[in-house]
Image: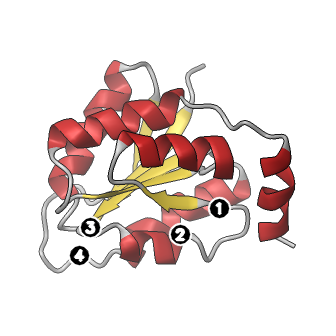
C-alpha cells in the first residue's frame, strides 16, 4: 500500500494543488485531496488546513501538503493541532532542513512566491528527505510538551 498524503489549498493555491496532487499520484503516493474541487475566490484557508492537520494529528496520515498565497495562513491553522509540524518552504533547501532538523510532517507552499516548477522541486526534496533524529529528536519532542 502506498503512503496516503492529505492535500489541501485555498483559492490562491488551487492551481498549484492540482499540480501537486497529480505529481503525488505519478510518484505512487495516494493523495487525499480535501479540496477545493473547483476554484472559488471565496474559499477560506482554515477550511482546508483543518482536515489535513487533523488527519496528520490523529495519525490517519503521516504527512500532508497545503498551499495558499503566502503559506502563512495554512501554517498558522495547521500548527494549532497536536503533533503537527507544518513548515512553510519556499526553496528545496528550506524543505530539506524542515524535514532533517524539525521532522516537518506538513509541507506548506506559498503559491504566490514559487513557480509550479519550484513547487515540484520543493515537494520532491521534502518527500525524499528523512528526519535526522539525534539531537533534533529532543527538540521536536519539546514542541508537544
Label at residue 84 = 1
Mark 1 neighbour density, 10 Å: few (under 14) some (14–19) many (20 or more): many
Q: Could you say which quadrant of the image residue 73 lies in?
A: bottom left
Residue 68, how many percent across, how many down?
28, 65
The residue under the point 35% across, 26% down is 25
The residue under the point 71% across, 57% down is 58
Q: Which of pointers 3 and 1 lies earlier in the amino acid sequence? A: 3
The reply to whether residue 34 is visible in this rendering is no
Q: Mark 3 sits on what residue?
A: 10
Task: Name the side, left or right, on which 79 lies relative to 136.
Answer: left
Contact, CB < 8 Å: mark 1 with mark 2? yes
Task: Name the side, left or right, on which 5 lies relative to 132.
Answer: left
In space, the residues marked 4 and 2 are separated at their CA atoms by 16 Å
Residue 94, how many percent across, how many down?
45, 49
Q: Which of pointers 2 and 3 lies earlier in the amino acid sequence? A: 3
Q: Which of pointers 4 and 1 lies earlier in the amino acid sequence? A: 4
Amino acid at each position: 500500500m502506498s503512503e496516503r498524503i492529505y492535500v489541501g489549498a485555498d483559492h490562491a493555491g488551487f492551481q498549484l494543488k492540482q499540480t501537486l496532487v497529480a505529481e503525488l499520484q505519478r510518484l505512487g503516493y495516494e493523495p487525499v485531496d480535501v479540496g477545493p474541487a473547483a476554484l472559488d475566490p471565496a474559499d477560506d484557508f482554515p477550511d482546508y488546513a483543518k482536515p489535513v492537520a487533523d488527519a496528520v494529528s490523529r495519525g490517519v496520515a503521516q504527512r500532508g501538503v497545503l498551499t495558499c498565497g503566502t503559506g502563512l495562513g495554512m501554517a498558522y491553522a495547521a500548527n494549532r493541532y497536536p503533533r503537527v509540524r507544518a513548515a512553510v518552504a519556499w526553496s528545496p533547501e528550506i524543505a530539506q532542513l524542515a524535514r532533517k532538523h524539525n521532522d516537518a510532517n506538513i509541507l506548506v507552499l506559498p503559491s504566490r512566491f514559487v513557480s509550479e516548477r519550484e513547487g515540484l522541486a520543493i515537494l520532491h526534496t521534502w518527500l525524499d528527505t528523512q528526519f535526522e533524529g539525534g539531537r533534533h529528536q529532543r527538540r521536536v519532542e519539546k514542541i508537544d510538551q
